[in-house]
Amino acid sequence: MKKMKGIGALSIGLAFLLAPGSAIHADAASDKLTVVVTDEPKSLDPCDTDLSGNSRILHNNITEALVNLSPADGSVVPSLATGWRQLDQLTWEFKLRDDVTFHDGKAFDASAVVAALKRAQDPALACEVGLATLKGVKFNAEAVNPTTLLIKTDIVEPILPNKMSAVDIGSPATPNDGKSRSPAGTGPYKLAAWTPGQSVDLVAYDGYWGDKPAIKNATIIWRAESAVRAAMVATGEAQIAYEIAPQDGTTEQDHAFPNAETSLLRIDAEIPPLNDKRVREALNLAIDRDGLVGTIFHQDAQKAMQAVPPSVFGFNPDIPIWTYDPEKAKSLLAAAKADGVPVDKEIVIYGRIGIYPNSSESLEAIQAMLADTGFNARLEMLETSPWLKKLLKPWDKERQPSILQTQIDNTEGDAVFTLPNRFTTDGNQSTIADTRLDTLIAGASKATGDERKKLFEEAFSYIAVDAVNIVPLFHMVTIARVAETVTYTPDVQAGNEIKLKSISYR
Amino acid sequence: MSFTYFLKRAAFAALALAALMTSAFFLVRLTGDPVNLYLPVDASDAAREAMRVRLGLDRSLPWQFLDWAGDMLSLDFGTSLWHNRPAMDVVLEALPNTLALGAIALTLAFIAAVVIGSIAAVNAGGWIDRAVNVLSQAAASVPDFWLGLMGVLLFAVTLRILPTSGFGGPIYWILPVACLFARPFGTLVQIVRGSMIEALNATFVRTARAKGARGGRVTFVHALRNALLPAVTVTGDLAAQFAGGGGVVEVVFGFPGIGKLLIDGILKRDFAIVQASIFAVAVVIFCINILVDMLYASIDPRVRVE
């Protein structure tokens, strides 16, 4: 009898303990959504939307820009601005909506944009948008009247509207003496809470000027482990999980989508033997891309021949994709060796841990392929900080010959966001110094329309075919796991933007 | 334990802390420059240099050290680069979570190890003893990380009785506690079993038995009291390890503790967070050591005399 009592008490205890668990796994209410991402945002300041961790939470959820880029073709579409035109080489005019208010009650008008643009370019604040997207050009905004804005530049800026798509407009009350942790924007959601280390909670903004979102409350949480993120959707704790590793993303709920990233290996073409073009060609011919896709890389990844995906303006569809030809690679190496090129010298492959799922495995496979062809390659996997030291200038003069694993994203839709830093003599990540290429890229950056397209295409062709200083691998995909109860189709911008207002329950 | 003894310990601890913090200062800076991590890769060299100047990283290491040492004396740990808040505020939010997690896991491990280890010792050589041996060796050697993911798979995904991860009510603590429980449990069972077997064969136990003392009383009062000492010592060491957080477990479960904070701080080159975390953990370890000494003295009167 005593024993029975004990078991009874144990059962009651267990039931009590597990009761809250059952509640957790009940279907989420139709106006609540939980999204799980990889990392806590670094900042929630409207001027820090150049890195995806911040942008995913802010952009088009809490804060908005004057314009957006269409995920379908990269064209510029209205948002807080209803229209725009170029008045002269250095001046653009934007017409703004007149029915918009910030979450803190302040009215959205031209002077708010003037303040936001000035803030984004303030060197003391070191805003991501100012340091990256707006870099190299001075943008002076001027309010003609509440709904008319002029933006003047010091040099010709043919894609000014594209660049404005990255400048999120915060309330004029946003402090100018430091970064904000409590942003007030014009978006469909306002910030409800940021509990450090745990979650960011958003709640629908009743005064939103556009269509009201179906989801009233959204929570964004972060978990480092892909398997845990995937499991959270399986258990109903989250409805959307991003960046699921291929090995964890094998269910019907897992959707692979192109993420505007291109994986490649950057060749340091200054150091022998990699300063010999035949050796660089041999590197490309030695890699069995068909063998990598569907195994280590996701089956939907597309073989690449340049540093941007087809969605980017300036992409050249006519560059031939490298074939896998180890025999030809061997003969190129032999010819170079005969001419005294030190092809036996050790080449380091610098990889970055976690740059994409299976990043180490991909380089282990590539190292083996290179060894089969006769290269003496050593793999060194680095975490982000030392990897950045290898990526960015200045480099050590006495360095070893190396190739570096990298991944280039271009969600802005124009080749100018990829080429100058990576492929011109002055570029801070560039291993190439070629005046012909410098001229091509500089000309393309200033040009408009068909001329711009043609020059960028030429530049990509020059890099891939003439200079051969990259080993292009794949236009990548990301896997998002989406609960069956939810309607959401991730698009090419989903790497930088969780479009909460496009999500609803079935 | 006398007050003088405590003061002596505190003085040694302060010296050790100064040495620890000095090495933390230099070691964390050897891991690389945080500037590249915090600016977009497209940022210009001028912007990078401006940030270095703003953070004082452009100055020579000795100057940086002097400045930092001055701030440390006034317990100013600086601002976290990632969190953009005073580093000690961030640390003090995470530390109680880790201490609670560690305390629960370790207390449960200690109690379970004492009971199971004693049972194994009493039945030394029998099948129960052998089973306990296998179980405890497995528990002591299973990696936290693997155990965590298996726990998620079994209890969250398959059985759906526990959440996969997160932070909140008691239900969220079960899997992290279970993962942190395994290793100390396995280790302590072995220790308790060994010292209990020794104690049960000791002369004073045999004398007690000869005088007619009952089996349970002999085992759990006379022998256990003596056998507990090594277990308490090891538990103290384990507690000190736990103060630094079960890093991997906290990462897997998204548990906002000091272990996760420290790992993130190192990966993100957030010097202020790393230094403030190390300081807080070192102070806690000092307190744990004092507590263990006191506990030791209360179990073994001979320690008090020494």
Image (cartoon, grey):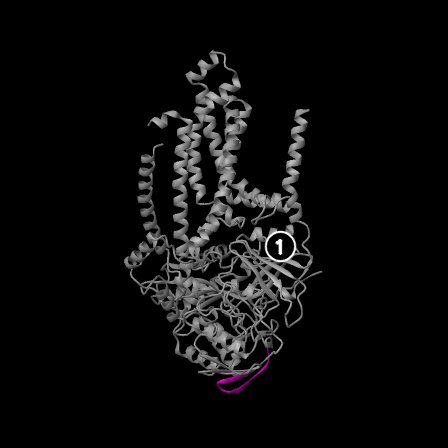
Which residue position is annotated with label 1? A238
Which residue occupies 33% across, 40% down? B10
Secondary element under disc 1, as helix, strand or loop, is loop
Is residue A374 visible from the viewing direction of this image? no
Is A126 above or below relative to A17? below
User: How far from the left and from the top, in percent, is residue A280?
Assistant: 42, 67
Magenta segment includes A87: yes
Q: Quadrant of the C terminus of chain B?
A: top left
Q: Nearer the viewer, residue A445 or B116?
A: B116
Q: Which residues are magenta?
A: A81-93
Magenta segment includes A145: no
User: How far from the left and from the top, in percent, is residue A245?
Assistant: 56, 55
Q: Nearer the viewer, residue B122 or B133?
A: B122
Which corner quadrant of the image does residue A337 belong to? bottom left
Q: Chain of mark 1?
A: A
Q: In screen coordinates, is B86 left or right of B164?
A: left
Q: Nearer the viewer, residue B122 or B131?
A: B122
Which corner quadrant of the image does residue A272 belong to? bottom left
Residue farthest front in this picture: B3
Residue farthest top in this picture: B211
Residue farthest right in this picture: A506
Residue farthest bottom in this picture: A88
User: How far from the left and from the top, in percent, is residue A462?
Assistant: 46, 75
Specify the principal SS of the magenta part.
strand
Disc 1 marks which amino acid? Ala
Is A288 above or below relative to B215? below
